[in-house]
Image: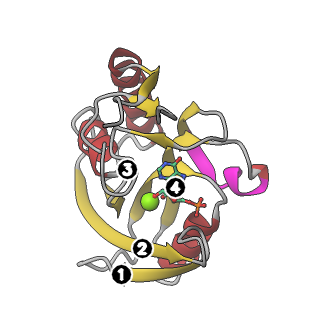
Amino acid sequence: MKGLPIEIIGAGSIQKRVKELAGEISRDFAGREITVVGVLKGAFVFMSDLVREIRLPLRCDFLRVESYDAQGKSGTVRLEFDLTQPIEGQDVLLIEDILDTGKTLQFILAHLSGKKPKSLTVCCFLDKGLVPEIRKNVRYVGFQVPPQYVVGYGLDWAGRYRELPYIGRLDPK
Ligand code: IMP
Ligand code: MG
């Protein structure tokens, strides 16, 4: 059996950073109510920690996307299910787990813009640093990570490791 993923960002650092991001968001949106939209499944752990630190009235909703290509990754993005409530005229904060090729985020931004929110702001937990032109659309980033496959804190490999409280890379053994 494979060993556990090797830690690259510890649980303590994650909790500290989540509090910092929530503080920035609370200041930037002070006096407003926000709609927090999580991208399932990867963003659910980050979003649940983040919303509990944000000091603003807020609502939560979710959407789910899948991307496919021959290798099963980052090809055509397809909407699996959509928001349950309209967001027209609302200040929307989109929560993503990781920015890799950026195709997923581009797709979601185009989709949500069509629903005419008052504002659409992106908070992404991790950024692999591969797509600076798409990174420009992301106001809040948790951590920069090396461009390798990472798991934990909501991110999976074949459905596993989402429950880890830290970010790790897979043990090649
Ligand atoms: P993109 O469309 O290539 O930016 O990929 C974004 C999506 O692919 C993310 O929302 C993740 O669900 C998944 N993904 C990309 N890189 C990783 C990784 O290193 N670990 C786990 N999931 C990843
Ligand atoms: Mg994802």
In the image, what residue occupies the spot 55% across and 70% down? 109
Which image quadrant is residue 152 in?
top left
Residue that carries the numbered disc 2 in the rendered image = 65
Kind of residue at disc 3: Asp
Q: In this view, does 53 lie above or below 73?
A: above
- Residue 155 rendering spot, x and y as whole percentages: 39, 47
Q: Name the residue under label 1.
A: 80
Highlighted range, magenta: 133-140
Residue tagged 3: 156
What residue is shown with label 4? 121
Q: Which of marks 3 and 1 is nearer the N terminus?
A: 1
**Residue 95 part of the magenta-drawn span:** no
Q: Which of pointers 2 and 3 indicates the residue nearer the eye?
A: 3
Quote the CA–CA distance across marks 4 and 3.
Answer: 25 Å
Q: Give the Cα separation between the discs numbered 3 and 1.
A: 18 Å
Contact check, label 2 and label 3, Cβ < 8 Å: no
State the image coordinates of residue 129 (x, y, percent, origin top left). 71, 42
Rendered residue at 38%/40% (across/down) = 30
Q: Is 15 displayed left or right of 96 in the figure?
A: left
Label 3 CB less than 8 angstroms from ligand 1: yes
Q: Is mark 2 on a helix, strand or loop?
A: strand
At x 52% / y 53%, what residue is drawn? 122
